[in-house]
Amino acid sequence: MFDNPAGSRIHKYTMSRLLLIGAFVLGVIGLQAQELNVNVKVNTQKLQTVDPKVFETLEQTITEFLNSQKWTTDVFETQERINCNFILTIQEELSPTSFKADLAVQSSRPVYDSEYDTPLFNYIDKEVTFFYEQYQPVQYSRNQYNDNLSAVLAYYAFIILGKDYDSFSPMGGEPYFQLAQDILNSVPQSAASANPGWRSVESNRNRYWLIENIMSPRVRPLRQAMYNYHRQGLDLMSQDIETGRAVIAQALEEVGRVNQSYPNSMIVQLFNNEKSSELVEIFKMGSMDQQNEVIRLMSRLDPANASKYREIK
């Protein structure tokens, strides 16, 4: 699973390396400097009244918005861009230009010296409402709320960036999680009332609670564990599979401690959703003691998938 040879993407994350690249290279790279490589799909199979071409245009508009926007000050080469999927499924036509939808957001990053991409984020937001007229542009302005669609898309772009950066350096995603939180805080009360997902009182599983969990001091050990899991664990496995597996097992212990200090947290549930299948494959070749411990821990963290974890043995 992890020891097939292939190229790898290591982001140029540090400011010192950015300065070495210099302004000349920034100009040469141009459009290649964007960070995201997003595949966008708009599903409309449940709809009958609005012209389907409106949603074809919407799909193109969202694709351009996410892939053409410069989200960071870092330089990404084409092969370093973060692969992700945004799948917008229109559930209801509230009016000819107003819609309710589910948005599935997924991102991954390559494991060093392998052909395997590990999932970093996998979430379905079932509370996306927005207005859209054909050929209407989607625009993002930092610290300014334009409309709900641009706010939701930019919010998840920063969540993806934060998760990716966290996997390459300890707490490396902090600036991007802060920007996601800034978007949440910029939504006017009237817009938050009209567009669900931004307020704590509506649910314990929405955009408010996602960023609250990520930024909570109680969750910081989990974020450190995600660096260890990916950079010190998965990325090491092509060279030293046993040590890499042991680091991942230790990272799971940290996730367990976060679950104890912050019970029923959204972030632990997301971790389970993202990593359950991967963990089964990683520990199938582990020692018996290691297998037993991972099965015990993950069955407690993720009881809905307890039978899946027993497949480790």
Image (cartoon, rainbow, N blue to C red):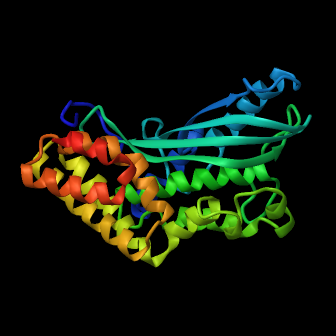
Residue 169 in which image quadrant: bottom left
Point 16% across, 40% down: residue:
284
User: Which image quarter holds the C terminus?
Assistant: top left
Q: Nearer the viewer, residue 150 or 202?
A: 202
Q: Can residue 111 be spotted in the picture?
A: no
Using residue 277 as the reference point, say whether residue 216 is left or right of it: right
- Number of marks: 0
Q: Is residue 181 above or below residue 235?
A: below
Q: Nearer the viewer, residue 184 or 238?
A: 184
Point 66% across, 52% down: residue:
154
Q: Is residue 291 above or below residue 205?
A: above
Residue 274 point in image, percent of width and height: 41, 47
Q: Nearer the viewer, residue 248 or 124?
A: 124
Q: Nearer the viewer, residue 109 or 258?
A: 258
User: Which image quarter holds the N terminus?
Assistant: top left
Point 74% across, 49% down: residue:
150
Q: Can residue 167 be spotted in the picture?
A: yes
Residue 103 point in image, percent of width and height: 64, 42
Using residue 154 as the reference point, say whether residue 16 is left or right of it: left
Residue 113 point in image, percent of width and height: 24, 38
Residue 209 in which image quadrant: bottom right
Q: Is residue 5 above or below residue 128?
A: above
Point 41% across, 60% down: residue:
166
